[in-house]
Image (cartoon, grey):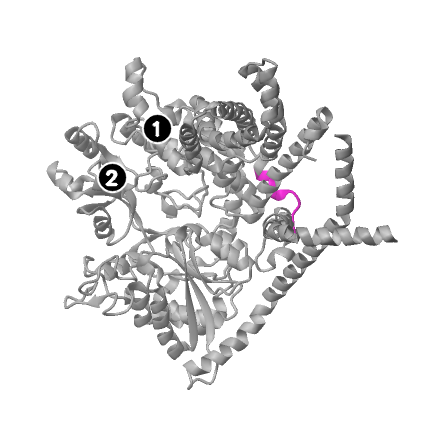
Amino acid sequence: MMLNSSKANKSSKSLMRRFPIYLMMAPGLIYLLFNNYIPIAGLAIAFKDIDFRKGILKSDWIGYKNFEYLFKTKDALIITRNTLLYNAAFILLGIVFGVITALLLNEVSSKRLLKFFQTTILSPQLVSWIVVSYFVYALLSIDKGMINNRILPLLGIKEISWYTEPKYWPFIITIMQIWKTIGFNSIIYLATIVGISSDYYEAATLDGATRNQQIIHITLPLLVPTIITLFLIHVGRIFYADFGLFFQVPMNSGALFSTTNVIDTYVYRALLQIGDIGMSAAAGFYQSIVGFILIIISNLIIRKFNKENALF
Amino acid sequence: MKSEKTMKGENTMIKKPGFRRIFTCILTVLMLMVLVTGCGNSTTPGTDVPQTNTNDPADTPDKQEKPAEIVMALCADNSPRTADAPLIEDAINDITLDKINTKVSLQLFPYSSYDQQITLMLSGNEPLDLIFVNNSNYSSYVSRNQLIELDDLIDQYGSGIREALGDYLDATAIDGKLYIVPTIRDLAKCYAVNMRKDLTDKYNIDTNAIKDIYDLTPVLKKVKEGEGENFYPLVTAASGRSILSYYVTYDPLGDAIGVLLNDGLDNTNVVLYEETEEYRDLVKLVHDWYEAGYIMRDITTTQEGYSSLLKAGKGYAYLNGAKAGYAEQATRNVGAPILTLPLTPYIANTASVTQVNWGISVTSKAPDAATKYLNLMYSDKDLVTLLCWGIEDKHYKIYEDGFAYYPEGVDVDSSGWTLNMGYAMGNQFLSPLWRGEQPDLWEQMKNDNETAGRSKALGFTFNSESVKTELAAVNSVRSQYRMLIECGLSDPDSGIIEEYVAKMKEAGVDKILAEKQAQLDAWLANK
């Protein structure tokens, strides 16, 4: 009895103590509830033939008909391939370059220089894809572009019609994506690195470890949980392509579709004129299901190897 | 180490019930909020009515009945040029409260998101009555049941509409029922080449010799040779649209996937235009122009339309759909005199008639009042003028020559109501002409509308609902090939057209054509 009441006392005390924290959490939770959870019910639209006279709830169920257009042509294969391969490359290269940049930034001792570097690599993140697409256009335009006008003649290469040659675009798109996201990725890693206790490094220095050995045996292993968390977050969105990157940067050029068409751009082009809510909901549903399955699988794999690092 | 860990474990053990309680507390609060907001939504329509009831008798003390309330959703950007929308709304209400005892609320949505806004309002069951409908979304609005049938309403309240539109009104019926009312404007159109007058004079170009698109080759050649390498005689009217999409000799039957050749004047056989010899010849022509340097090489990716290119002195001519008064309009846009030479005859088809229309939302609470208001837009000179040009002596003034223009000290940016959307305001023929137009513009347009050739399928609207899977796939293929082929980048002899057609067939274009033909035949049989 005594024990029980003291327990209750304690818990109510801690409740009082933590109440402000929960209060601070509330706006975020409410936002999540309204923005992310309640709309889940809207997935039903993907299986309905929307009729405004009947309203969304009473519209007819039509099974998988809304999904058919996604798989109608051979393009379905190209789109799926492009979406998955690009995103896989982005995740992999994003981790590699992000970690390398973070390690390099960590080595910069001058505070002012560090600020300068951080600002420089972070600034592309803040530029919208539309603006970026014009940067790229200024470089690649066939008549006026800098590469065709200045750089290629110097190398003695004939001008290239960039916007009609699909073979160059896997590289252009990957480079642009890495250039744009590297700052943000590296900052997350840098934050983890900065948070690593200096005790480890001191001990290692005492034992005579070189800088490289310290990085390989201390920094990288301690970075792994962060890397895995970011990896899982990205894998969950592997079937979502960045519309701005794939639509704006190639300037919607039809000749490039074999290497630039991804699921988001396909859906946009297919439904631009029809404007069918059911069909666009179907595309979103398909994307989230694939993402969901991939996240579960990769988490399972990670849990098998290293239980502590798994997300759930 | 170990003891620390166990301590931590105990700590969490103790805290757990507290956490759970907090969590349930938060959840309960959230649920309550949902309930409250949910209830709020469902009760608003009910509470709204008494509120307006208490307000309105003060406004119109002499009226016994409460005024009906309607919402007109206008497709216009919220910018300084529409800053006086509240004043216009008041002025509209001065007219409508008096004449039809209706209160109109004006809502402006930007062009880019208009459809989305409407869809959101409809799914949220928000008050909405008059919707601006254009020919690209008309059929889907109807197939999704977003608009109500207007036949009875127009018979009852819409005598002005019928009088103004004549038999063109019936041209918009779907399955024999009216869902929209086209605005009065150029109901028939032609396709024309538009060129800068100064260069035309400079190179002594005989404009009388230009009768069809093939006559343009020598003209473009002459200008290209004279103006040099970085000058492109032919530019596209709008970025992202192909050259050939502005030279239309067929009835597109909606989306141009399956068309009637020769503007639908001869027969009613639905064909795939991309398979015809005519298409191949035109592609060949444009390709020759492209190879000769008459068309800019990055035409498929350029973001510049005709006005900036012609203004900058980089272009000479462009193709576009035209109507009486188009040259004056283009001259204003470019800032230099433009000549417009028709390349095709004036034709009325469903697309040209239904280009701009008004419909009444399925969520409308007062369809009667909305129809009465629509009727005023087609018959009341004051209302039309107000919508087109604003308030007299504030936004416009009628000068001695009979033309309307800004009052002294007011210009485009300071006016507060420079919509320039007369074509959308019902019967613009009732409004005064703006300075710079030809004095007989309205008569010319009326004449073109009356004398134009009419497609055999005028009035037929394709309902794509049953083939929308195929349509989505075909649209995707078209977005891949159309610009490339129709801007001249690809040589038609390289087999690209065959590849394009084959891909469309794979996507199911034949099914669309068959469905279109079946619907058209059924429509013709019922006519």
Q: Which residue is mark 2?
A: B309
**Is B217 on the left-hand or right-hand side of A269?**
left
CA neighbours of label 2 inside 10 A, class few (<14), some (14 to 19), many (20+): some
* Mark 1 neighbour density, 10 Å: few (under 14) some (14–19) many (20 or more): many
Q: Chain of mark 2?
A: B
Q: Relative to B265, is A194 on the left or the right?
A: right
Q: Residue at x 25, y 44 (%)?
A: B307
Element under disc 1: loop
Quick check: A26 above or below B287?
A: below
2 vs 1, front mark: 2
Q: Is residue A77 visible?
A: no
Q: SS at mark 2?
A: helix
C-alpha span from label 2 to label 1: 20 Å
Q: Residue at x 54, y 72 (%)?
A: B48
Instruction: Give the extent of the magenta segment.
Output: A61-69
Q: Based on the picture, tell me whether residue B15 belongs to the magenta stretch.
A: no
Looking at the figure, which quarter contains the C terminus of chain A? Answer: top right
Residue nearest the observer in this picture, B90 or B203: B90
The residue indicated by pointer 1 is: B489
Q: Give A120 or B230, whichever is nearer the viewer.
A: A120
Residue A197 position within the rendered picture, expressed as x and y whole percent measured from the top left: 60, 28
Residue B333: percent from left, percent from top? 24, 48
